[in-house]
Image (cartoon, grey):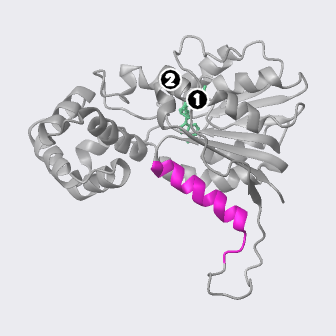
């Protein structure tokens, strides 16, 4: 199965497992809410019939352009739209299919984005501190947040989204530094972090702090909480939702959401009988999260932290 997205250097993660769990209806309709360079959608197309329909969404216009290129010639491709998955209902209202046999969310970032210094996602290259998935938006960049938020707000971001105990110290250093000179590039920010926090685990520290600002800039956790129930609404009965997450801040809400929908009833455990009447709407297809094989982890570093969860709509 050739799933490489040409020109992006991007390898889709857990691709065989996604295809195995999601492609249950050969003639079905499939929606990839984070299409990126289109690796998963392309792999799905390769096992479905010509009558199947494929749709994609991404906030990043460059990803949409590349996905179109990589899916050129795919007879099942219907549309790839540049939009946030938080607006999925409005987007789908214009599609030929309004309900889907499979919906995929591959959270996180593509190699296309990570390896472009101009996007500012990586501490490995020097570039502007942007970090917006949607570069056409007027929303704040990472530099805007870093140079304007209060020390308390910065501490909150670094602690909550970067899980750093030294968040207060780093926030104080940011505020002190920006009084002298604005922090505008990934190199400025990287050097400041390394000057402030001394640790042998430099890579982990930088990855966590950069991740924290990426999550904040793109409202990633709010968007995730918003899209999960909407995705279930858009599934046919028997349709499946597959979610790949890359860290516990993403995986925890996904796991909790699926469990709540499997349970149905939201009454407190102390109630003898259910009074809420909420019925289960999902069944778990994967009891535990699926992780990449050692072979995939060796050849695709992004797969090392990936966790795939799949659930099926039952009502
Ligand atoms: C890990 S990549 C997807 C890669 C793709 N599954 C593949 O393997 O070819 C995640 C993608 O999600 C997109 N994304 C992030 N937040 C989004 C949102 N709220 N709405 C739509 N796309 C989003 C990013 O721009 C990125 O292209």
On residue 13, the disc is 1
Q: What kind of element bears circle 2?
A: loop
The question of residue 256 being in magenta is answered with: yes
Q: Quadrant of the N terminus?
A: top right
Q: Which residues are magenta?
A: 248-266
Looking at the image, which residue is at 17% across and 31% down?
A: 191
Q: Position of residue 219 (x, y in %)?
A: 46, 48
Q: Main secondary structure of the magenta part?
A: helix
The foreground one among 139 and 164 is 164
Which element is circle 1 on? loop
Residue 176 image point, x, y percent: 10, 46
Q: Is residue 166 magenta?
A: no
Q: Which mark is residue 300?
A: 2
Residue 183 occupies quadrant: top left
Using the rendered view, name the quadrant where residue 2 is placed: top right
Residue 277 position, x and y percent, is 77, 78
Report the side of 298 relative to 268 (left or right). left
**Residue 185, horizontal then vertical, whole percent:** 25, 28
Write the residue at 30% across / 37% down: 204
- Quadrant assignment for the C terminus: bottom right
């Amino acid at each position: 199965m050739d799933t490489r997205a040409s020109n992006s250097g991007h390898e889709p993660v857990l691709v065989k497992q996604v295809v195995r769990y999601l492609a249950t209806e050969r003639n079905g309709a499939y929606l990839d809410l984070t299409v990126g360079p289109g690796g998963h959608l392309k792999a799905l197309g390769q096992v479905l019939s010509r009558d199947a329909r494929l749709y994609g969404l991404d906030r990043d216009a460059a990803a949409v352009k590349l996905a179109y290129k990589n899916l050129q010639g795919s007879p099942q491709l219907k549309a790839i739209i540049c939009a946030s998955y938080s607006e999925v209902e409005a987007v789908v209202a214009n599609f030929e299919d309004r309900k889907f046999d499979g919906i995929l969310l591959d959270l996180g970032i593509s190699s296309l984005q990570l390896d472009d210094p101009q996007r500012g996602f990586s501490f490995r290259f020097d570039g502007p501190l942007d970090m917006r998935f949607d570069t056409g938006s007027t929303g704040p960049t990472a530099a805007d947040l870093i140079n304007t938020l209060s020390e308390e707000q910065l501490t909150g971001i670094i602690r909550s989204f970067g899980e750093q105990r030294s968040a207060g110290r780093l926030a104080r250093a940011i505020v002190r530094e920006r009084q002298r000179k604005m922090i505008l590039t990934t190199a400025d920010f990287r050097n400041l972090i390394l000057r402030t926090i001394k640790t042998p685990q430099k890579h982990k520290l930088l990855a966590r702090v950069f991740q924290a600002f990426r999550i904040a800039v793109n409202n990633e956790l709010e968007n995730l909480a918003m899209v999960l129930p909407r995705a279930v609404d858009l599934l046919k009965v028997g349709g499946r939702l597959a979610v790949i997450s890359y860290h516990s801040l993403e995986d925890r809400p996904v796991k909790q959401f699926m469990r709540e929908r499997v349970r149905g009833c939201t009454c407190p455990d102390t109630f003898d009988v259910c009074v809420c009447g909420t019925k289960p709407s999902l069944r778990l297809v994967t009891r535990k999260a699926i992780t990449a094989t050692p072979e995939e982890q060796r050849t695709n570093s992004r797969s090392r932290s990936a966790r795939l969860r799949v659930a099926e709509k039952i009502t």
